[in-house]
Image (tube, grey):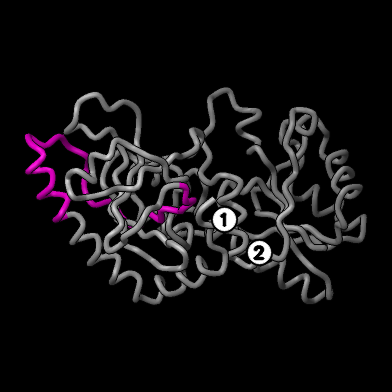
Amino acid sequence: MIYVLGAFDGFHLGHQALLKEARKIALSRETSWGILTFSPNPKAVLGKRSFTDLFLPQERERIAAWLEAPSLEVLSFTRKLAEMGPLDFLGFLESRYPLQGIVVGEDFRFGKARMGTVSMLEEECANRGKAFKAVPSAWKDGEIISTTRIRQCVRDGRMEEARNLLGYPYFVSGTVVPGDQRGRTLGFPTANFSVARNKLLPHPGVYGGMVLVEGVPYAAAVNIGHNPTFEGVRGIRVEAYLSGYEGDLYGFSLDLHLLFHLRNERKFPSSVELIAQLREDAREISRRVRLWSTSGEGEKILSWLRRASVPGKG
């Protein structure tokens, strides 16, 4: 099997180039290919600061399915593994996986203290009769596409830029749980999402998004923040108003695909003014999501999502 090897906190356009190369090599050798990655992310184990995931493990599984990767192998990353020298690490992979070839990015490093280089890996693969390919970094707007760059886009709420680098919208997965019921009282019932604490969230604000519920797409006005109009709200909340949806979403596992940032969160003098703004937000978001959904990009993404959608109600 030909393996694409890397940490892959997400599968951006640069990573997708690696998948294409692995598919090409596997076809030429009449074998299969797949992704070999790690969990938790090596930075979460070795870093000195707390680490937030760009994509959670279950989210990465769905992205791999969208991209039609035949196999996704996840290796548990531990400090013991991190202490292996480069050659020991390569031998460990050979003993555990049917390794016929390796595809990596040109900046890939491996083994203890990241001592293993691409040139070392290429030489070792040649000595062991295995295929090898280092794929050049992908560029966009004069900069290398990297997970670090995408993480900063998400933090800043620049969702359209993140989407252009990923090749699909950034999304937040969660389970719908009971909230304060305040939105229902105001005439805007929202789905309150329970999201993993280690999931990277965008800057507080209102976002235009799309949610697939049992195969049907709905425009979503997504609020990420503290609801400053009302007293007593603590901690970041993720809530979504689904235009046109009627029904009970409690218990559903859903993905919020964030397409664009609409406005910053702000405190309104009264609930009347808040409702007026919510109506305006919902109209504008529905208009823009409808245009996106009928575009070439939107149609492609919706096809992906339907191919590997979340389970629904758990």
Tell me if 155 is positioned left or right of 69 in this view. Answer: left
Residue 203 in picture, x, y percent from top left: 33, 39
Residue 99 in picture, x, y percent from top left: 86, 57
Which of the 4 quarters of the picture holds residue 299? bottom left
Q: CA distance from mark 2 to mark 1?
A: 9 Å
Label 1 crowding class (10 Å Cα cut-off): few <14, some 14-19, many 20+? many
Q: Are marks 2 and 1 in contact (CB under 8 Å)?
A: yes
Magenta residue check for 254:
yes
Q: Does 269 appear above or below 192?
A: above
Of residues 292 and 307, which is closer to you in this image? 307
Tell me if 43 is positioned left or right of 209 in this view. Answer: right
Q: Which residue is mark 2?
A: 19
Residue 77 visible at all = yes
Tell me if 102 is positioned left or right of 148 in this view. Answer: right
Give the residue drawn at x 42%, y 45%. Answer: 176
Q: Which residue is mark 1?
A: 11
Magenta residue check for 169:
no
In this picture, which residue range is highlighted in magenta? 251-280
Give the residue drawn at x 41%, y 56%. Answer: 257
